[in-house]
Image (spheres, coloured by chain):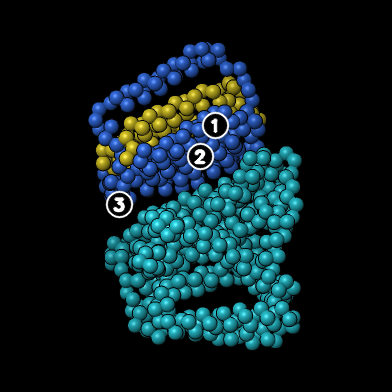
Amino acid sequence: MISFLNANATIIIYLVKIALLLFIVLTVNAYLTWFERKVVAHMQSRWGPHRVGPHGLLQPLADGAKFLLKEDPTPAGVDKFTYFLAPLMALALALTSIAIIPFGPEPLHIRGRDITLGIADLNIGILALFAITALSVYGVALAGWSSNSKYPLLGGLRSSAQMVSYELALTMSVVGVLLLAGSFNLRDIINAQAHHPERGILGWNVWPQILGFFCFFVAAVAETNRVPFDLPEAESELVAGFHTEYASFKFAMFFIAEYTSMITVSCLCTIMFFGGWLSPFPASWTFTHYLPSVILLPFGLWVIWDGIRYETIFGKIILPGVGAAITAMGAVLIAFPAVNEFIQGPFWLLGKIFVFLFVYVWMRGTLPRFRYDQLMSFGWKLLLPVSIANVVITAFAILMWGAR
Amino acid sequence: MTPQLAIFFVLAALAVLGALNLIIQRHPIHSALSLIVVMIALAGLYLLMGSEFVAAVQIIVYGGAIMVLFVFVIMLLNAGVEERTNVSKLAGVAGIPLAVALLGFLAAAIARSNESAQAGVESGTLANTKEISTMLFKDFVYPFELTSFLILVAIVGAIVLAQREKS
Amino acid sequence: MVPTSYYLILSAVLFGLGVVAFVFKRNVITIFMSIELMLNAVNLAFVAFSQARHQSDGQVFVLFVIVVAAAEAAVGLGIIILMSRNRQSLNVERVDFLKL
């Protein structure tokens, strides 16, 4: 058994990493729905989910069970093969794109093996991501077509036109970053922003590429079909758009795909414009390395205190437990400096990703939906010219003053 | 059999099956889907040869733009199942055997050709993205500019064609 | 390591299938797709030669072919939309007049 493990260690490590990442992403997805409902509810002066578990924390579990147990009817007249293929394709492509994201600078050393954080480290990382994004149009378009119903068809048509249009702006807007980094590899792009460690936040790509960042983020929101670009599933016009005829687990697949691509886009924004795992503080400020514990310890203590005051017995048990775990994590980081050093990169990366996810939810809570002609003229007449201008300006600047 | 050869055969089989399915299927959307399979298999073959950039462009442009346009038009026109019309008898009697013979000749000629064709493609030996870009913007800069002109003409042409006439 | 001739044979087979599809299909859109298939087969040969001879110009040519294919698809699909609007059919055999 041991010898078998040693002989196939590389493959086994990959499989374990894939399984772990899949588990984490799906869990984060589930809690993202909870987070979204909770934040939007508070923005609209409501409570949001609060019945299932303390603060509604078990709501994702209940939703998952509901998705699995509901009846799954196949409407008459659908194109069977395409009807089943579409949600599978959407989910598979969304999950594949996560595999290219690197999650930390240093590999993990376990028993003489280096385990990099992240699954695939491709030379053409960003191009591969765009290739996957390009293919993900099919999930939506085919779902709309194969349902053999008018609202899904309209949703599918809208979304394929929208996604193809905004893909251009999406691709053009990162060219500036690629010119600065001189590489398609995501790790190289992050390392290019670390050239002046003493500058900290000022060395990130977002300052020279502010136009590019604006175009990228808007185009990326449109690519993921989120508010204010959610025309393919505009419930007031098209019932539920392309997934009207999908129920139960097939609907859940679209749902998971959408939230996973939200995570991917947040990762990409962070990596390309906000320095990835780099700390916003100058490298000489080593005391900022205690920031993870400084956040975790009070938060854990607050959760314990909140749990003790909670109304139900269940919450009185669960919440202090969770709070104790969080506090313990913070304490461990102080107790073991090596662990604390290792956690710095992933901490900043995940923190920034969380901020972007919050922005996504925030936009959903505030912005009204675009009209279709506004969407098209915005994409073609504003976003695309601005992103091309950004490429030209960046190229000239690099020609004049060099890449850094 | 080396792993590379095995991957080649899998991808080649996928491409050929996709192309066959394109012919067999009678609904345009199914044909389009099988063509997408062919394109992705070809992108895999480019990766196998070490041409990463071409592979990515193949999927982004062919898979993500051109084929989406096809699917979009099929959906827009609500194209139904293809009508069967009678095929010329001559095609069945003479055409298919001739096509097979031509293919056979081609394959035989390629298989028995000179050393360079037999030498084999090593993956990732040369031709990285940087070299392609240098070549594209130095040696082939005039054709490159011409293609941009071509695209412009195509955009204008497509708009003129698809525009409804104002009454 | 895969011999170049394998790639060339695959390219020939795909091109042949493209020709067969072009001749046999009756739907204009599918006929267009078979043209794309033939272009793809040629691209494969280009890349295979380029890698075998260690010269990049073949791959640059592939990029040009892709650009031409994109332009062709844009104009061609415009024509197809016009055609279906004027004749209510996508069958090539129904398009046998030079006027509307």
Q: Which residue is mark 2?
A: B37
* Nearer to us in this view, A223 or C11: C11
Q: Which residue is mark 3?
A: B130
Q: Residues within 10 Å of mark 3 (few under 14, many from 20)?
A: few
State the image quarter where residue B117 is shown: top left
Q: Tell me which amino acid carries mark 3.
A: Lys
Letter of the chain in cyan? A
Marks 1/2 in contact by CB < 8 Å: the verdict is yes
Query: In terms of secondary structure, where does tag 3 sit?
Result: helix
Q: Residue furthest left?
A: B115
Q: Which residue is mark 1?
A: B21
| Residue A213 location (% of width, % of height) | 46, 65
Res. A366 visible in picture: no
Q: Earlier in the sequence, mark 3 or mark 2?
A: 2
Which subunit holds the residue at mark 1? B
Q: CA distance from mark 3 to mark 2?
A: 28 Å
Compared with A253, A198 (above or below) is below
State the image quarter where residue A314 is shown: bottom right
Q: Are marks 3 and 2 on the same chain?
A: yes
Look at 68% across and 70% down and name the residue there. A58
Look at 64% across and 45% down and name the residue there. A84
Marks 3/2 in contact by CB < 8 Å: the verdict is no
Letter of the chain in blue? B
